[in-house]
Image: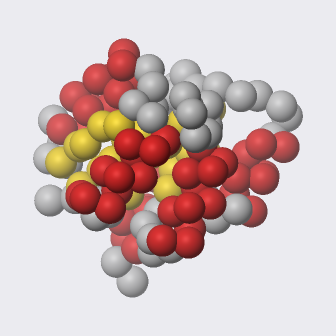
């Protein structure tokens, strides 16, 4: 069973993600802040991380940088409502994010396909 860590401060969003992926057999763990997300990643050693950019305290940029140093093999999918014509997406991908989704996520099915792709990439 694949294990996901979701780092996002919006409870409604994390509940939707947990229900969607949980119903598909994923083990889902949720953190509401960047620092608690890093601790959860260390404790759970997930197969994929789903993360918002704007987080209380430590933001998604800092968390992504830290994850690339400590757990470079774990794919990180960024999900953010920050729309600036693709500059943020390009920057996050250059920093090592596996993929980027705009919030609100228009298709959880597309997100699930990206998670599957991340899992198959990480397994190699």
- From this viewpoint, is residue 98 visible? no
Residue 16: x, y in percent?
31, 23
Q: Quadrant of residue 18?
A: top left
Q: Quadrant of residue 48?
A: bottom left
- From this viewpoint, is residue 31 visible? yes
Q: Is residue 91 left or right of residue 26?
A: right
Q: Residue furthest bottom?
A: 124
Q: Nearer the viewer, residue 96 or 20?
A: 96
Task: Please report the residue visible at 51 percent of the width from the left and 62 percent of the height from the top.
Answer: 67
Number of disc labels: 0
- The N terminus appears in which quarter of the rendering? bottom left
Q: Is residue 55 left or right of residue 73?
A: right
Residue 77: x, y in percent?
51, 50
Q: Quadrant of residue 14?
A: top left
- The C terminus appears in which quarter of the rendering? bottom left
Task: Please report the residue visible at 24 percent of the width from the left and 58 percent of the height from the top.
Answer: 44
In the depicted structure, whether residue 73 falls above or below residue 53: below
Task: Please report the residue visible at 40 percent of the width from the left and 73 percent of the height from the top.
Answer: 122
In the depicted structure, whether residue 56 falls above or below residue 109: above
Residue 96: x, y in percent?
64, 64
């Amino acid at each position: 069973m694949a294990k996901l860590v979701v780092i996002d401060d919006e409870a409604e969003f994390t509940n939707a993600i947990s229900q969607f992926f949980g119903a598909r057999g994923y083990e889902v763990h949720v953190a509401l802040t960047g620092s608690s997300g890093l601790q959860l990643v260390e404790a759970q050693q997930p197969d994929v991380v789903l993360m918002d950019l704007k987080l209380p305290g430590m933001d998604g940029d800092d968390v992504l940088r830290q994850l690339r140093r400590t757990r470079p093999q774990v794919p990180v999918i960024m999900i953010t409502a920050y729309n600036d014509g693709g500059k943020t997406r390009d920057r996050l991908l250059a920093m090592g994010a596996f993929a980027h989704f705009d919030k609100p996520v228009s298709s959880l099915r597309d997100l699930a396909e990206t998670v599957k792709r991340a899992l198959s990439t990480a397994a190699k």
